[in-house]
Image: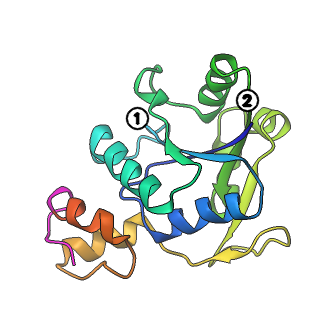
């Protein structure tokens, strides 16, 4: 089985994440998508507690359904969590599967900072999806430029996020991000 590993902060997950995961399955880019929240970010990015983000990803997987699930492997891997190390660990642990990295076009601007990006690109056949505000891709649609940063900012201001976050997640995020959801 070909697994698309969709890693990220997911702080919080939003409709863009759901659309990308569904598109990968609907277009047979992979047989399954594993949402993989990072436990420690290599760029020392502050994040909400891992368990909370994992729980939100589990709800997102339920919303999308089908072959979308979560993977908590980074909880047990040494920090910082480099994508290369995580993908190699998954390949060694689940030898019956092949793995592809799933990422947004926005990450392409940062790959020069990634640990072993060239090896990732050679060995884990990245599926790069378009994202509004970044150069378009001829092999993938451009998805709306939703961002977790935008969701957190709106919540901090007391704004509504029900147009950016699946309803099954809304009731969980208000307390995590300092405001009531809605």
Tell which of 91 and 68 is nearer to you. Answer: 68
Q: Which residues are magenta?
A: 175-182
Secondary structure, mark 2, is loop
Foreground of the two, 166 or 40: 166
x and y percent of residue 44 in the render?
Answer: 41, 40
In the picture, the quarter occupied by the C terminus is: bottom left
Residue 30 image offset from top left, x and y in percent: 74, 49
Q: Is residue 11 left or right of residue 144?
A: left
Side (left or right) of 161 relative to 39: left
Overall secondary structure of the magenta stretch?
loop
* Residue at 70 percent of width and 57 percent of height: 108
In terms of sequence position, does the residue under pointer 2 or pointer 1 come before the other?
A: 1
Drawn side of residue 167 relative to residue 42, left or right: left
* Residue linked to disc 1: 39
Quarter location, residue 122: top right
Q: Circle 1 — which element? A: loop
Residue wearing tag 2: 97
């Amino acid at each position: 089985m070909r697994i698309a590993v969709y890693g990220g902060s997911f702080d919080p997950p939003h409709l863009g994440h759901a659309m990308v995961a569904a598109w990968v399955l609907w277009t047979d880019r992979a047989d399954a998508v594993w949402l993989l929240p990072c436990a420690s970010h290599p760029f020392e990015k502050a994040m909400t507690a891992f368990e909370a983000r994992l729980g939100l990803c589990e709800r997102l997987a339920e919303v999308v359904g089908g072959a979308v699930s979560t993977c908590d492997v980074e909880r047990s891997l040494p920090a910082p969590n480099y994508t290369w190390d995580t993908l190699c660990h998954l390949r060694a642990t689940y030898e019956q599967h092949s793995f592809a990295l799933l990422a947004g076009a926005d990450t392409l601007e940062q790959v020069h900072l990634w640990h072993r990006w060239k090896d990732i690109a050679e060995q884990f056949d990245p599926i790069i999806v378009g994202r509004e505000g970044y150069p378009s891709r001829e092999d993938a649609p451009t998805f709306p430029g939703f961002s977790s940063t935008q969701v957190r900012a709106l919540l901090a201001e007391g704004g509504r996020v029900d147009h950016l976050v699946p309803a099954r997640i809304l009731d969980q995020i208000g307390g995590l991000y300092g405001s009531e959801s809605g």
